[in-house]
Amino acid sequence: MIKLHKIIASGLGFGFFPIAPGTAGSILGIGLLYAVNYWLNYLGYQELTIILINLFAIILMTFIGVQSIKVVHRTWKHDASEIVIDEIVGVWIAVLAMPFQWQYYLYALILFRFFDIVKPLFIRRLDKMQGDWSVMLDDVLAGIYSLIVLQTLYFLNVL
């Protein structure tokens, strides 16, 4: 069972990339979501349905991810670089409810990585906490900040 949690926590092994595993996990996350949403669009699902499916996936993977983080923390250090499920969830949040165009997925990825690396406005405080949830929540907050910026730029017709 621990093997399954390592696979989940490491984002199918992307967390083991030797350089920038967080970015590798974020790229995996945005790529997976783009592929799923492409498929849902192809099948003719309405935009609101796709948003709700994405929201369900975010919530589900947040809880599954925290459980996997809790398990791998028994053998890995706290917030080990191999743990990237939090980046996957965070980047999914960053692109939530945006129009289905590859550019928005790219913008979401860039904004999310910016907020995840710089850690402004309480993200750093969450990152320094030692709980299993803190590993996930700093990236959730980075995703929310990215989503706010992206949605604002979209609303103002900047993008």
Image: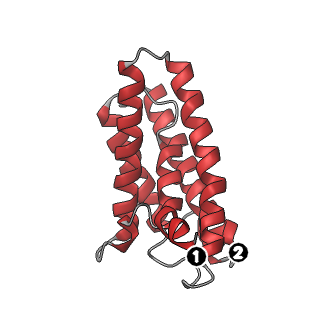
Q: Is residue 121 visible?
A: no
- The image position of residue 142, as x and y in percent, is 54, 56
* Image height of 127 relative to 63, above or below: below
**Residue at figure coordinates x 60%, y 36% from the top left:** 55
**Residue at figure coordinates x 67%, y 71% from the top left:** 132
Specify the amino acid type for callout 2: Gly
Determine the secondary structure under disc 2.
Answer: loop
**Residue at figure coordinates x 44%, y 29% from the top left:** 154
Which residue carries the number 2 mark?
A: 131
Closer mark to the observer between disc 2 and disc 1: 1
- The image position of residue 23, as x and y in percent, is 36, 62
* Image height of 159 relative to 57, above or below: above
Pick the front one: 27 or 74:
74
Instruction: Tell me which corner region of the image, top left, top right, bottom left or bottom right, holds residue 138.
Output: bottom right
Identify the disc placed on residue 72. Answer: 1
Quadrant (top left, top right, bottom left, bottom right) of the C terminus: top left
Horizontal side of 142 relative to 108 (left or right) equals: right
